[in-house]
Amino acid sequence: MARRFPLAGLLRLRHAEQDRAAAALAAANDRVRDAADARIAARRSLADREDTQPVTDAATLSALAAARASTRGMLEELDAVARSHRADADEAQATYNAARRAALGLEKLEDQHDREQAAEDLRTEQNALDEIAARRRTEGGAR
């Protein structure tokens, strides 16, 4: 009879940790993409404003300069947010990699255990067959 893998509970725990880390990594990557999309939208907005606003007096020029400064400030903030999200994503990737390594080691142990159990089962079966064959020879020779 095959023995159950003694570290099966720990392996399930490692797989659960890996799943959580994968979910956190996916969420972090989504935030990175959202920040990049927001930055692209802000750049487009800045480019659109440059082409559509004619400067006719000093007040318009001043308002245009303030709008551009504001947009540049927003771009800098978006860059900072993107860097922060990228750092979070890198950390989530490292956490996932560590969880995967921990699970992989146990998976290899489980595979080795399964191979050993299969070999033991085959040995047991072969011994039983050999014993049956030996009985038949001794019973057949005694008649």
Image: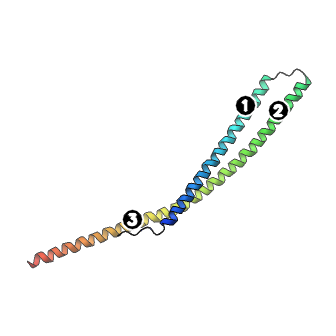
Q: Residue sitting at 36 percent across and 66 percent down?
A: 118
Whole-angstrom CA distance, mark 3 to mark 2, is: 68 Å
Q: Quadrant of the C terminus?
A: bottom left
The residue wearing badge 3 is 115
Res. 100 in view: no
Q: Quadrant of the N terminus?
A: bottom left
Q: Tell me which label, 3 or 2, sits earlier in the chain.
A: 2
Res. 110 in view: yes
Question: Viewed as shown, does residue 129 lie left or right of 64?
Answer: left
Whole-angstrom CA distance, mark 1 to mark 3, is: 60 Å
The residue wearing badge 2 is 68
Circle 2 crowding by C-alpha within 10 Å: few under 14, some 14–19, many from 20? some
Q: Which mark is residue 44?
A: 1
Seen from the viewer's position, the closer of residues 28 and 111 is 28
The amino acid at mark 2 is Arg
Q: Are marks 2 and 1 in contact (CB under 8 Å)?
A: no
Question: Viewed as shown, does residue 45 lie left or right of 91?
Answer: right
The amino acid at mark 3 is Arg
Q: Residue sitting at 31 percent across and 70 percent down?
A: 123
Whole-angstrom CA distance, mark 2 to mark 1, is: 12 Å
Percent from the top left, x then y, of residue 128? 25, 72
The amino acid at mark 1 is Arg
Element type at mark 3: helix
Q: Residue sitting at 66 percent across and 45 percent down?
A: 31
